[in-house]
Amino acid sequence: MAIKLIKLIKENKGGFIGALLLFFLMIMTCYALLFVSTQSRLQWNDPIFWSDNPKTAAPEWFNIILKPFGYQLPEHKIFLQKDAIVNTLNDIDFKLENNTFSYQFDYNEFPSSFDIPYTITLGEIPPILEIYVKRPDNLEFKIYSNSLESVNSLQNSEDSSANSVNDNITAPTLINSNTVSGRVFSSSQEVQNSLSEYSNIFKFPISGLSSEKIIYSQTDSNTPLKGEYEFIFSVYSFDSDTILQNLKLVIQGKVFGLLGTDEFRRDVFFGILIGTPVALFIGITVALSSSFIGLFYGLYSGYTGKKAGTFMLTIIDIFISLPTFIIFIIISIHFGRNLLFLIGLFILFGWPGVALLNRTFSIQIKNYPYIEASKLMGESDFKIVLRHIVPQLLPFTLANFALSVPIAILGESALSFLGFGDPSFPTWGQMLQEAHASSAETLGYWWWIVSPGLMISITSIAFILIGRSLENLVKIGKRR
């Protein structure tokens, strides 16, 4: 049977394409399970984990499409402390340390924003932090200044953890007894107030403009000024215990990664990747269980006949007549949206259709002459079923299994899209629901919608094509 199956798939172009698509999905599944840590997968709904990513950035390859038109969107850049040029000035009363990041800006639009996270160990005397931006036209803007107060007056990181993902708050937080962590956002009020002092330089009103549209703008018009920018992070320390431990410059671009990002800064490709094993687990588990139950329930119902068979047929009819999708929604509302619970519901209502078809075939097969001959020879019903009936139902059951996988995946996606899925798992349907809730279709965030939708289609097409090939195997077996 296995050799015939492989041969048929090779001969059938649709089955071959379906097998290739399934192979692609299995590679993604294996990569997600073997090379993506469990801790990383659990961070999908943690906004702090994605804080260095840009919001709703398009895929990087979108710039390749725009390049022939002479138009480029800002790329997302992250500069680490080791990328900075460090200059120090030692005086009798203080020490000045300048960390300078160079950024080449050659794009046709302003960056979405920028932010500078830092971690610093404090001494007895609090240091002074200042940030400057030197533009290609040699203008220099002082955009931030803060004298860190005593350790006791700083916020505790547990009490202000939400600040790390709030673009309007730059207050440093205490992470241990003498270490402070902070993040300066371009959208913060401190930066905007500092830039307002340079309004006389520009020939257009800058009130109401975002910080990046001022810093990266030409002075005579609000259009991007291309060239090399320098971000200078200065630390004035007054004792030897003050040490800058960690520093980054994050330029929030408008293109990022293979599939872009969503409203929550999450990498869409990462969500697609870790959602692949979840989708296959849902589809295969539901299809395998419902096919197994449907095979033996229908077989027993058809072979037994009489009152027991009639009663079992009534049970099938009741299940088939129920509005299953509405029942799923009602049960999800009242009993929770746990993924395993939803899988159990899909199995509970997924087997009757397979059972009804298997029952019909079982009634036909049990009346064949060789079945009657086996009974006359004294062969038990158990052996007759295993040797003569199950082998003939198995190819058909395999075909139904392949066709049931996309039904389960589409069912879960539909429930998640309507808001009744398990939000703790990054399923493709959940991604579509979040995209819809954020108005991605009206705001033009097409990558957020197309990516999970395309993966649902690819998975469904793969199993449908394989299922059609298995149906051909059933037909060939009947002719023979």
Image: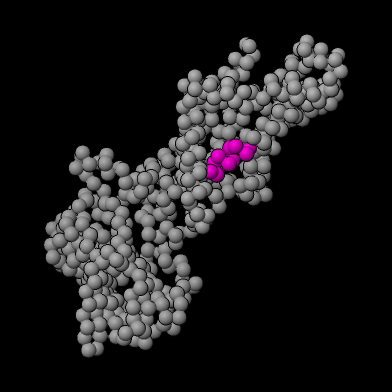
Residue beneath the point at 56% across and 37% down = 409
- Please tell me which residue lies in front, 211 or 397: 397
The overriding secondary structure of the stretch rendered in magenta is: helix
- Please tell me which residue lies in front, 225 or 87: 87
Q: Provide residue 458's location: percent of width, then percent of height.
A: 47, 33
Queried whether the magenta region covers residue 280, the answer comes back as yes
Quarter containing the C terminus: top right
Occupied quadrant, residue 199: bottom left
Q: Give the range drawn in magenta.
A: 277-286
Occupied quadrant, residue 132: bottom left
Residue beneath the point at 61% across and 47% down = 339
Residue beneath the point at 67% across and 41% down = 345
Seen in the picture, residue 442 relative to 386 is either above or below; the reply is below
Seen in the picture, residue 479 relative to 73 is either above or below; the reply is above
Q: Provide residue 144's location: percent of width, then percent of height.
A: 28, 72
Quarter containing the N terminus: top right
Q: Provide residue 245's location: percent of width, then percent of height.
A: 35, 73
Report the number of numbered marks: 0
Residue beneath the point at 56% across and 26% down = 467
User: Is residue 273 visible in this depiction of the protein?
Assistant: yes
Queried whether the magenta region covers residue 257, the answer comes back as no
Seen in the picture, residue 412 relative to 394 is either above or below; the reply is below
Tell me if 435 is positioned left or right of 235 in this view: right
Tell me if 236 is positioned left or right of 380 in this view: left
Q: Which residue lies furthest to the front in this view?
A: 3
Seen in the picture, residue 381 relative to 454 is either above or below; the reply is above
Q: Provide residue 393's location: percent of width, then percent of height.
A: 69, 22
